[in-house]
Image (spheres, rainbow, N blue to C red):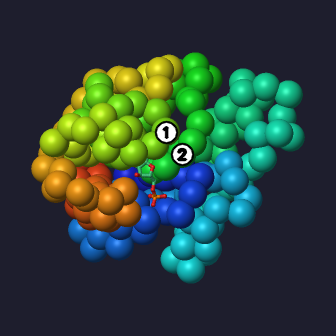
């Protein structure tokens, strides 16, 4: 049977990308990394793993529609069925959303709808909440909106630093994201 093929979109360090590709029983093949930042460390991770990369600079395009149209072409060429956003620092627009309706998911380091957007962990600490967590959700045009698929919470310890909490949240992310992928693709 032909395996499902998926793309990961990432802009940064790629620890979630690594956690996904490290799974030995993933129900899909991560066939391509899409990255909008030519200097992102995630690119080396993909190269080390022998995964194709498509790296683009949004500044080289006239509009979002233009680069998303090219993205859809590339994803089609690679027979991609699912897209996993993992630290992709860009809003997805209608061109890509329509082409992959119900097939794009994202991970976010908070219990959405709380603390959307950047620095979600810092937002939670500054707010002084005692519980935060991780969310995996389908995406729509909004910032970290879209139907929630799974959440996992953790208690914030007293005097926990941003670094400490980030580390604990990342550990949860690296477990939860592959778990959700395994649930969705069978
Ligand atoms: C993660 O915290 C993820 O939840 C958020 O961006 C971060 C990406 O980290 N969307 P990494 O590049 O996977 O290490």
Query: Residue 50, how many percent across, how many down?
Result: 56, 76
The image quadrant of residue 41 is bottom right
Q: Give me the disc on residue 151.
A: none
Q: Residues within 10 Å of mark 2 (few under 14, many from 20)?
A: many
Q: Position of residue 110 (x, y in %)?
A: 30, 40
Residue sitting at 73 percent across and 59 percent down? 38
| Separation (CA) of disc 2 from disc 1 | 11 Å
What residue appears at the point 35 percent right and 32 percent down from the top-left corner? 115
Q: Which residue is outermost to the bottom?
A: 48
Find out if the beta carbon at label 2 lies less than 8 Å from the nearest ligand 1 atom: yes
Q: Is residue 95 above or below residue 31?
A: above
Q: In the image, is 126 to the left or to the right of 33?
A: left
Q: 179 or 26, which lies in front? A: 179
- Residue found at x 85% / y 28%: 62
| Left or right of 92 on screen, residue 1 | left
Provide the secondary structure element on which disc 1 rests.
loop
Secondary structure of residue under mark 2 = loop
Q: Which residue is mark 2?
A: 88
Circles 2 and 1: CB atoms closer than 8 Å = no
- Mark number for residue 118? 1
Query: Furthest-front residue in view?
Result: 159
Q: Residue at x 56, y 29 (%)?
A: 92
Tell which circle, 2 or 1, labels the residue nearer the N-terminal end.
Answer: 2
């Amino acid at each position: 049977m032909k395996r499902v093929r998926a793309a990961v979109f990432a802009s940064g360090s790629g620890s979630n990308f690594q956690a996904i590709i490290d799974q030995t029983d993933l129900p899909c093949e991560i066939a391509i990394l899409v990255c909008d930042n030519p200097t992102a460390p995630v690119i080396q991770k993909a190269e080390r793993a022998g995964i194709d990369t498509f790296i683009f600079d949004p500044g080289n395009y006239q509009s979002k529609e233009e680069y998303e149209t090219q993205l859809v072409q590339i994803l089609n060429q690679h027979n991609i069925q699912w897209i996993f956003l993992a630290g992709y620092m860009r809003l997805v627009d209608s061109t890509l959303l329509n082409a992959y309706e119900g097939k794009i998911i994202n991970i976010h380091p908070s219990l959405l709808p709380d603390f959307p957007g950047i620095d979600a962990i810092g937002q939670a600490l500054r707010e002084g909440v005692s519980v935060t967590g991780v969310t995996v959700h389908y995406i729509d045009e909004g910032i970290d909106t879209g139907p929630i698929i799974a959440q996992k919470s953790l208690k914030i310890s007293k005097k926990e630093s941003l670094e400490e909490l980030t580390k604990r949240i990342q550990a949860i992310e690296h477990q939860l994201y592959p778990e959700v992928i395994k649930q969705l693709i069978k």
